[in-house]
Amino acid sequence: MNELVIMKDQQAVTTSLKVARQFKKNHQHVLRDLDRIIEQKGGVQNWTDPQGNHVFAEGTYIHPQNHQKYRIIYMNRKGFVLLAMGFTGKRAFEFKNKYIDAFDAMELKLQEQRKQQLFPKSPMETLKLMFQATEQTDKKVTKVERRVTDLEDNQSLAPGEYNYISHRVRAAVNEYEATHHLLLTQKQRSKLYRDINTGLNQVTGIKTRTQLRKKDFDTADEYIRNWQPSTATLQIIKQLSGIAKGQMSLKNQRA
């Protein structure tokens, strides 16, 4: 895990090639994802952090085997975080954490150099500081932890977690039907599913269940455990059953 982060032009950066190798991704795919991010600002020259530092920079490298030049993108901490937000899985989480540690270590080294006044001060060399570190190592560790937590929380649910939620939805509908001794048609039962799924989407702020994130898991689970169909849904089911107007209960429909 050496040299995840390097010093270039007196600042802490990593490269698209290093990210591709560490996360076991195709370099062209990493470049494609970076281009999509950069396009949102109209080019690398337009993307800066709050301190006015450029987040990305274009470059080239020589391939060790064919000795040809290939495109590469340099990025500071903010650029890496923007890119790595889309990386999911346990391995990705571990590497993101190590990358943040590497940025911290390099930025600490840069800070010590500043204290010792080792930075060149010519106008040309001053321009190179545009890529200076986006975060200072004197920031609290809790901010780093919060950043990592946000990346983890915004990951999609693992297959097992997603299947658990789907199972709980089916179980809640079946339990409601059994508890109230209902014998519902497929059309009536679909109204219950629509009711619970609509509420689930509303409390988690999503449009479809596939958009659930890890941060939504506990909210979704609690909602399903406490779910009761709305009055409107029950009224529609009664109408589909041909229950007389004024009869409020759906009980004992299996008689």
Image: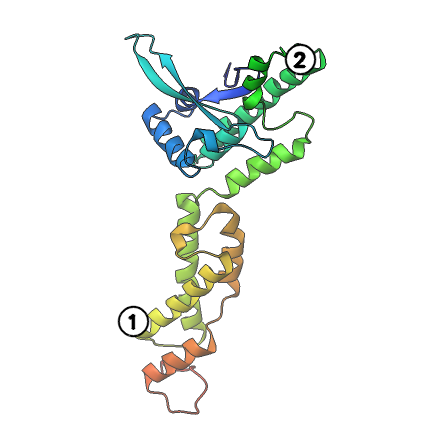
* SS at mark 1 in the image: helix
Query: What is the spatial separation of the Cα atoms under label 2 and label 1, in whole angstroms?
Result: 72 Å
Question: In the figure, 190 relative to 101: above or below?
Answer: below
Residue plotted at (54% across, 17% down): 128
Q: Which residue is mark 1?
A: 186
Q: Is residue 173 left or right of residue 220?
A: left
Residue 220 drawn at (x, y percent) = 49, 56
Image coords of residue 86 (percent x, y): 43, 37
Q: Is residue 167 above or below residue 26?
A: below
* Quarter occupied by the C terminus: bottom left
Badge 1 local density, few (<14 within 10 Å), some, or many (20+)?
few
Q: Nearer the viewer, residue 251 or 162?
A: 162
Q: Which mark is residue 113?
A: 2
> In the rendered image, is residue 143 in sight?
yes
Amino acid type of the residue that numbered disc 1 sits on in the rendered structure: Gln
Q: Secondary structure at mark 2?
A: helix
